[in-house]
Image (cartoon, helix red, strand yellow):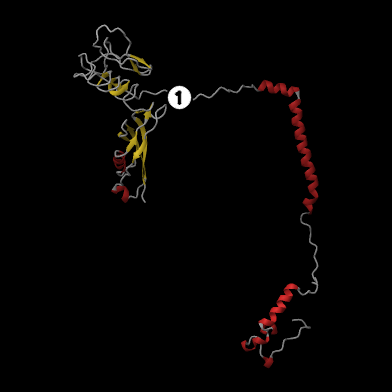
Amino acid sequence: MSAHDEPMAFPRGNSPDNPDDIHLLLDSKIDEPFFRSLPRSIKELIHPPKLPPLEVTSKPVAVKEIWGFYGGQGKRAGLGSILIHGAAIALLLFLGTNKAVQQVVKQQIELIAPDIAPYKPTVKKDTMHGGGGGGDRSPTPVSKGKLPKLANKQFVPPMISHVENPKLVMDPTLIIQPDANIPKVNMDQLGDPLAKSGLASNGFGSGGGMGSGRGGGVGPGSGPGFGPGSGGNMGGGAYRIGGGVSPPSILYKVEPEYSEEARKAKFQGTVLLFVIVDENGKPRDIKIIRPLGLGLDQKAVEAVEKWKFSPGKKDGKPVAVQAQIEVNFRLL
């Protein structure tokens, strides 16, 4: 409190902390009725009262310039950057137009014309994963003999002809890749090299050909090839996905059950299985590629055995296809 300030007097020497005297500190306008203060508020809203000019008693104080060192160097730094970039551009132009430099570059760099030929995808030939079979429903098994010629197309299936002196003779063929390692026997008659019967018979299969299968081939399979596979070519297994062979798709799926040992151990993971999906969409020949243990491998096999598939296709026809299936075990 300055010397010119006078202390506020309170009646009876009471301090302002006394709650009974708090009304003495209030402005008298607070007790003014609403109907009296309303006209004045409207008037002040329309014509606000002019306030006395604000008197500024403080003055700005000059401080030391902290950026003075850098500010003085700005122009020189910018000029130096322009000169450096200009010199670099001039050097590049000089080297690019200099004949001696161009001659050296030609000696070191060999230009190669781009290959603009149209793209032709390379399709891998089907490996030996087919088979074939046939017969004419003879009561005796197919006789032993040599295989006919190998070709890409088949016009006549291999069969023991019962017609004497036919007018039109065509060489029988099998659809097998030419470099296939087929079994060979030193015999003149056609037949199955793996057969044991010596009687002349086409076998009790069907669809032409020789064997116990169907489809104009030789063997117990299905198709114009040789062996227990299907779809042609040679093998004893199923087709691999790719090269014109579409993968099978799942139609019905059974979730695997948890084994008690794995549940108690709170064990989780994935079992990888190999499976062949046949022409009817049924899984067979299931093998475990990556096991988990604790009884989960067998649970995975039992579940996949109940699955149903839409079979893979080759040339629009269902064929047996090899596939790998992951069976996941997760605790909720």
Query: Which sits in the foreground, 79 or 20?
Result: 20
The answer to whether 156 appears left or right of 22 in the picture is: left
Q: Quadrant of the N terminus?
A: bottom right
Count up the numbered dots. 1
Query: Which sits in the foreground, 50 or 2?
Result: 50
Vertical arrangement, residue 63 with respect to residue 93, above or below: below
Residue with the most extreme bottom position: 12
Answer few, some or many: residues within 10 Å of disc 1's Cα (few below 14, many 20 plus, some between 14 and 19). Answer: few
Dividing the picture into quadrants, the one containing residue 277 is top left
At 67% from the left and 82% from the top, the residue drawn is: 35
Query: Residue 78 at x, y = what percent?
Result: 78, 44
The answer to whether 69 appears left or right of 120 in the picture is: right
At 76% from the left and 41% from the top, the residue drawn is: 81
At 65% from the left and 88% from the top, the residue drawn is: 21
Dividing the picture into quadrants, the one containing residue 252 is top left
Q: Amino acid at mark 1?
A: Val
Dividing the picture into quadrants, the one containing residue 45 is bottom right
Query: Residue 319 at x, y = what percent?
Result: 34, 28
Vertical arrangement, residue 101 with respect to residue 172, above or below: below
Q: Which residue is mark 1?
A: 123
Query: Residue 126 at x, y = what percent?
Result: 39, 24
Query: Which sits in the foreground, 63 or 56?
Result: 56
Residue with the most extreme left position: 139
SS under mark 1: loop
Vertical arrangement, residue 288 with respect to residue 133, above or below: below
Query: Residue 46 at x, y = what percent?
Result: 74, 73
